Image (tube, grey):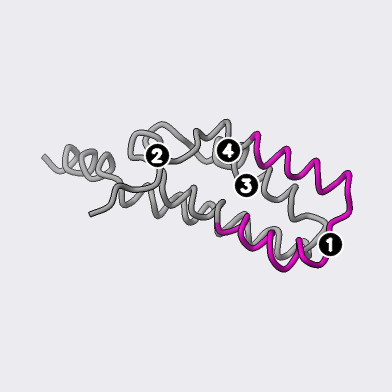
Amino acid sequence: KAAPPSTLPLEEFRALLVALSTLVTMHPSSKAWDTSVLPRVRAAVMGRVERMRDEEVKSLDRDQILRCICEPFVGLIATKVTPREIEDTREELLLLFYRRRLQSPFLEKRLKALTD
């Protein structure tokens, strides 16, 4: 089985999204950006949440996910989508995080400790 791809540390991932958002704000994007690059960035953001290491999932809370992933990504797409789509994206990212948290072994250990 192949090793999972390494993930960029969360703060560095946030910095990358903020830089992209600034770039898009300073230079109006083209149709190619909207149809080709933006979907790839979206997939990378979703993938980053899905590939969180167990230790990372354990140490993060909702506010950190909002600050480091949701809000920078929303800043990047804000001029391209409707307010409803922004809310949907924010909810989707949080749900991915919650699902990842439910799948992590630390939660299983905590639940087992409660039943013992």
Horizontal relation, residue 69 to residue 9: left or right: right
**Which residue is rendered at x = 70% and y = 65% of the image?**
85
Q: Main secondary structure of the magenta part?
A: helix
Amino acid type shown at disc 1: Ser
Q: Quadrant of the N terminus?
A: bottom left
Q: Nearer the viewer, mark 1 or mark 4?
A: 1
What residue is disc 3 on? 70
Q: Which of marks 2 and 1 is in front?
A: 1
Between disc 4 and disc 3, whose residue precedes? 4
Residue 32 highlighted magenta (yes or no): yes
Stretch in magenta: 15-43
What residue is disc 2 on? 57
Q: Nearer the viewer, mark 4 or mark 3?
A: 4
What residue is disc 4 on? 13
Q: Position of residue 22 (x, y in %)?
A: 80, 41
Amino acid type shown at disc 3: Cys
Q: Where is residue 15 in the image (x, y as percent from the top left)?
A: 65, 34
Amino acid type shown at disc 4: Phe
Q: Regarding mark 2 in the picture, which secondary structure is present there?
A: helix
Residue 100 highlighted magenta (yes or no): no
Amino acid type shown at disc 2: Val
